[in-house]
Amino acid sequence: MKDLDRISSAASLAAGRRPSPEAAPTAARRLAYLKERVIESLLFLAAFSSVAITLGIVGTLIYESSTFFAHVPLWDFLTDTLWTPLFASPRFGIVPLIAGTLVTTAVALMVALPIGTVVAIYLSEFAPPTLREIVKPTLELLSAVPTVVYGYFALQFMSPLLQKLIPGLPTFNMLSAGVVMGIMIIPYVSSLSEDAMRAVPMALREGAYALGANKIVTALRVVYPAALSGIVSSYILAISRAIGETMIVAIAAGMQPNLTLDPREPAATITAFIVQVSLGDLPHGSIGYQSIFAAGITLFLLTLVFNILGYVLRRRFREVY
Amino acid sequence: MSDFRRIIAKRKRQDFVFNIVGIVCTLVGIVTLGALLFNLLSDGLARLDWTFLTSFPSRFAARAGILSSWVGTLLIMFVTACAAVPLGVAAGVYLEEYARRNWVTNLIEINIANLAGVPSIIYGLMALGLLVYQFRLGQSILTGGLTLAFLILPIVIVATREALRTIPQGIREAAYALGSTKWQVVRHHLLPYSVGGTMTGIIIALSRAIGETAPLITIGALTFIAFLPPSPVKSAPPFVSSEWLFSPFSVLPIQMFNWVSRPDQDFVVNAAGAGLVLIIVTLSLNAVAILIRYRVRKRIKW
């Protein structure tokens, strides 16, 4: 009888209920109950720590850049075309850094999106399963290589290679940084898109085949649109990665702010600027120190825009089977 | 009839052509990976020897080594693992086993998905403003380790949740039927059964943290350091010391970055050597993770 009692109270503990008043709560049982509640609270705090990190990020960026924007009017920040925060007469126009970021990102996407999509279609619809099981993890190793190693590769291998193809290309240029960055993010596109395409029900493909379509037409006209929600989110992830990528551009694209849309020229990105300033020894509270937070909040907002866009697109293109 | 044949032939040709295009595109990635490894090996292999691993950096390329940076990497990884693993696993357990469907849970889940998309250098800025200057932890190993722990936390949480999700509901119900409390179920059943999947995720996360450069540069890691942090073990009681936590540091990727950005070709060779060490470590960690995943899949049959 006593055992039965214990079981029932344990069961109600497990269900997160208070033991019923009939099962006269002994001190031991109360302790056990208390222990369960304490553990649950600790686990909740661990989960909530991720929210605290986000608050820390947003709070720090806003706090540190607010002093920056007290010195530099927001309008100048957005419209001035010169970024020279460490000069004697500093100018704070973010436009050149944004241009550098967008150009390297565009080059990377021109490499990663087509190649990644074709690889995804090939692996999901064409390749024999054994080949897929080998190729997919091998490609994923591309995203495991440290980015500083990619920076070395872009500067020491890709740049000389491209210089042979494009005469007059300087050693530091956005093109080689962008191309290498694009190859690095291929697996983000290919793996996630392939997962999305493989989740498309077989019946849709069979329907297409029954109407006389071949594999490629089925893949492009049936499977690709059906998996669009997953594919779009892989594209958005690739964009976020490219915008936030730091070491490749810091090493291979040069660190001079340069307002240009020509990928053959060297230019600094937002991330490269933050690295460049951090390498020096700036006093805490100086305008140079604050400028990296202003650059950081711009970068954060840029990626946030794409994350939200991805969320919206995912909902719009979601196919319910 | 011949029309029909022609159409069939055309469609088969289309498929054939795409097969070729697909193989070529797949090869782009694999060939690049090969070229990168070959490039590092041909530049850096000659530099890779015992003295390179046991020397401090130097103004003279031929005498420079990576001792202080690999020790730094090791210590940072220790701090990162100590912070990220308990926190991430606990958060994963809460979200998968305890959390009720309400707005707080939703907030946490959306937040974790968003954190995974924040560029790593932003974590560095946060750590610089918050840990270095507000909490006054300094530009130390502790700050660096915590920064990377924040960075990989979402990966650990997601891996833990996925591992827990593969455990059949029947296991939980059987344990409850025998009178286990919720925590007993987690402690004695769910955590041991999910350890393979969780470990895979943790190793992948740590291999990512090892290669991270930008956030550590941002918090002010040194690019040239010719001494080791104080030893954590002392000869006098209490025998352990936490002094090393507050020591300045450098890590392998920063050392490599420092060398690669110098015009002197001899230092570039050093960079290749450091890169080789870095890539050997990250690729072997990934191999271990794949191996664990494979063995777990083979062993467990629910």
Image (tube, grey):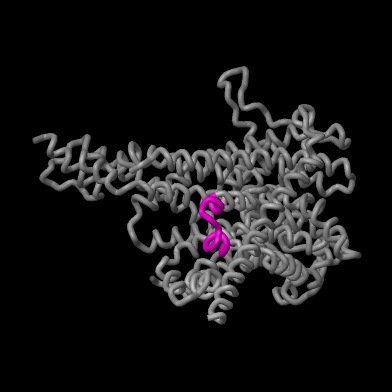
Placement of A46 over or under B299, stated as above or below: below
Q: Which residues are magenta?
A: A120-133
Q: Quadrant for residue A236, please give it.
A: bottom right
| Residue shown at the point (78%, 33%) measured from the top left | B48
In the current view of this chain or complex, which residue is farthest to the top?
A: B236
Q: Position of residue A10 (x, y in %)?
A: 21, 42
Residue B65 horizontal side relative to residue B154, left or right: right
Image side of residue A85 versus residue B150, left or right: right
User: Seen from this angle, which residue lies furthest front?
Assistant: B1
Q: How many marks?
A: 0
Q: Does the rendering let one see residue B39?
A: yes
Q: Position of residue A87 (x, y in %)?
A: 85, 62
> What secondary structure do most residues of the magenta stretch adopt?
helix
Quarter of the image with the C terminus of chain A in it: bottom left
Give the residue furthest to the left.
A1
Q: Nearer the viewer, residue A27 or B17?
A: B17
Q: Is residue A309 visible?
A: no
Query: Is A129 colored magenta in this rendering?
Result: yes
Residue B89 higher or lower than A277, as above or below: above
User: Residue A127, how many percent across, how many down?
Assistant: 55, 58
Front in this rendered view, residue B287 or A276: B287
The quadrant in which the N terminus of chain A is found is: top left
The residue drawn where x is 60% and y is 31% is B242
Q: Quadrant of residue A202?
A: bottom left
Residue A261, magenta (yes or no): no
Foreground: B193 or A274? B193
Tell me if B229 is positioned left or right of A198 in this view. Answer: right
Between B23 and B232, the residue placed more toward the observer is: B23
Question: Picture coordinates of residue B66 (x, y %)?
Answer: 76, 35
